[in-house]
Image (cartoon, rainbow, N blue to C red):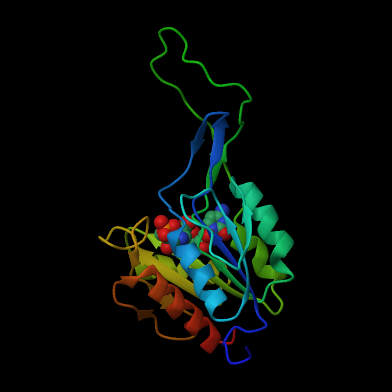
Amino acid sequence: TKALPLHGKRVLVTAGGTREMIDPVRYISNRSSGKMGYAVAQAAREMGADVTLISAPTALTKPAGVHYVEINSAEELATTVKAHFDATDLLVMAAAVSDFRPVQAVDQKIKKQPGQNGMTLELAETEDILKTLAPLKQHQFVVGFAAETQNLLANAEKKLAAKKLDMLVANDVSKPGVGFNGDTNQVTLLTPNSTPVTTNLLSKQAIAQTILKAAIERGA
Ligand code: PMT
């Protein structure tokens, strides 16, 4: 109904850790479970939004009532986000996107050679999706995340500016219960012209609601 705060809004959420293939059976990824992004998608749906969730493979149940697109690599994620961006009012990039990918994904399983005692894998930079979107922004309110293990605030301020975000959600993933994989998180919300606000350690559902409420307050 009209009373819901995100009624009529199209919300695009990314979740999970991208997979960068090395060969048909091996990939480079990270510890993202998808839980944070799924919680945002679910909370946005409950607030009345038309939600699209773009997710790397996860062990999670898809949230009900949400459009779902599964991707593997950072490149597929980039293509899919860009295809949806025009028809998005609020983008929340909770996905843990690989910054590098193997230069070549070979099409046969790499064999260990007799006597081989090491190997070098050459990596190339992936596209920074949020940076690509920055100059394409019109009505969209864009929320990025920052996963840090040190200097949380300083690194977060840099990402907020470099990626021209409307809001940045920073989590110190070196702290117990924060960031990857668990059911809880603690975040600092940064916006271009105001003092950062840090939440308590809360369920990812509660963090998701806090992020969306803050985005709405800031004009999303
Ligand atoms: O999935 P969970 O297990 O619940 O864990 C949640 C989480 C820790 C993954 C989540 O809270 C989080 O921090 N997500 C962002 C992780 C990340 O990739 O952070 P980053 O600091 O490397 O990237 C900064 C931002 O740029 C992110 O919004 C990211 O989506 C985006 N990015 C990164 C690389 C890239 N090539 N393109 C991007 O757009």
Q: Nearer the viewer, residue 175 or 182?
A: 182
- Most extreme residue toward the left, as rendered? 176
- Please, is residue 29 above or below residue 64 in the view? above
Residue 10 visible in the shown view: yes
Task: Name the image quarter holding the N terminus.
Answer: bottom right
Q: Residue 104's x, y, as percent?
A: 62, 31
- Please, is residue 148 above or below residue 19 in the view? below
Q: Residue 121's x, y, as percent?
A: 50, 29
- Please, is residue 109 above or below residue 43 in the view? above
Residue 192 visible in the shown view: no
Number of numbered tags placed on the structure image? 0
Task: Name the image quarter holding the C terminus.
Answer: bottom right
Q: Nearer the viewer, residue 125 or 22?
A: 22
Which residue appears at 59% of the width and 45% of the height? Answer: 73
- Most extreme residue toward the top, as rendered? 114
Q: Residue 124's x, y, as percent?
A: 57, 40
Which residue appears at 43% of the width and 80% of the height? Answer: 210
Q: Nearer the viewer, residue 14 or 35?
A: 35
Instruction: Give the image quarter of residue 24.
Output: top right
In-image side of 137 versus 193 (left or right):
right
Instruction: Give the image quarter of residue 68.
Output: bottom right
Q: Nearer the viewer, residue 156 or 17?
A: 17
Which residue appears at 70% of the width and 67% of the height? Answer: 85
Q: Residue 81's x, y, as percent?
A: 66, 60
Which residue appears at 50% of the width and 79% of the height? Answer: 212
